[in-house]
Amino acid sequence: MEESTSARGACLCGEVCFEVTLPVSICVHCHCTMCQRGIGAGFVTWFAVPNERLSFVSGKQNLVRYTSSDHGTRSFCGTCGSSMFCESKLHPDEVDIVLANMTDPIGADPQLHIYFDDRAEWIDVRDGLPRLGGETGVEPLDQSPSTDTPSPPAPSAPSAPDA
C-alpha cells in the first residue's frame, strides 16, 4: 500500500478542518500541567510539522487563540472547544497538533514522553518509550522501572454467595 503524503484532521464538531503535509517532525506524549489542564486528561499526544505544512480546509476563522504562557499559544475550536494546536516561541517554525484530532493516519507513532516528571500521579506508563523531564521538560530522566508507580492490585471478584 502506498503511503499518503498528507493527512486530514478536524475538531469534534467538524467546524475546523485542516490538512498536514507529511512526514511529521516528531510525535510525543506531553505530561506538562498546561497540557493536562488544556486537554482535560493526564497527558496529550502531540505531533509537530513545519508551519507551512499546515493548511485549513475550513473553519480557520472559528479558531480561538489563548496565550497559555510567555512562550506559548494554544488554539481551540470556538464552537465545540476541541483543543487543536499549540505554537511556541521555543520552536517558532513548527506547530504542534493534537494527534487525537486526526481523521487520517500520520505515519508515525509516539516516540517519547516529555515533561514526564510532571505527569499525573494516577498515570501508569509502561510503554518503554524514553522519558524526558527536568526544568526544561526535555532533559533525560532515569529510565529505570522505579520511575513508574506500580499499578494497584486488581480488584478481586466478589465471591459467590453460598447456596
Image (tube, rainbow, N blue to C red):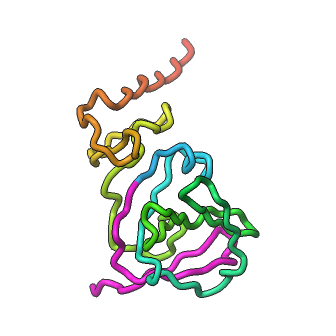
Q: Vertical placement of 50 versus 122: above or below?
A: below
Q: Is residue 162 left or right of residue 47?
A: right
**Would you say residue 24 sits in the magenta stretch?**
yes
- Residue 112 is situated, as x and y percent measured from the top left of the image, at 32, 52
Q: Which residue is found at the position 48% from the left and 70% from the top?
A: 95
- Residue 145 is situated, as x and y percent measured from the top left of the image, at 26, 31
**Would you say residue 139 sits in the magenta stretch?**
no
Q: Which residue is found at the position 41% from the left and 36% from the top?
A: 117
Q: Which residue is found at the position 42% from the left and 65% from the top?
A: 91
Between residues 14 and 75, which one lies in front from this camera angle? Answer: 75
Write down the region rendered in magenta. 1-28
The residue positioned farthest toward the right in the image shown:
79
Q: Quadrant of residue 84?
A: bottom right
- Residue 72 is situated, as x and y percent measured from the top left of the image, at 55, 59
The quadrant of the rendering that contains the C terminus is top right
- Image label count: 0
Q: Quadrant of residue 135?
A: top left
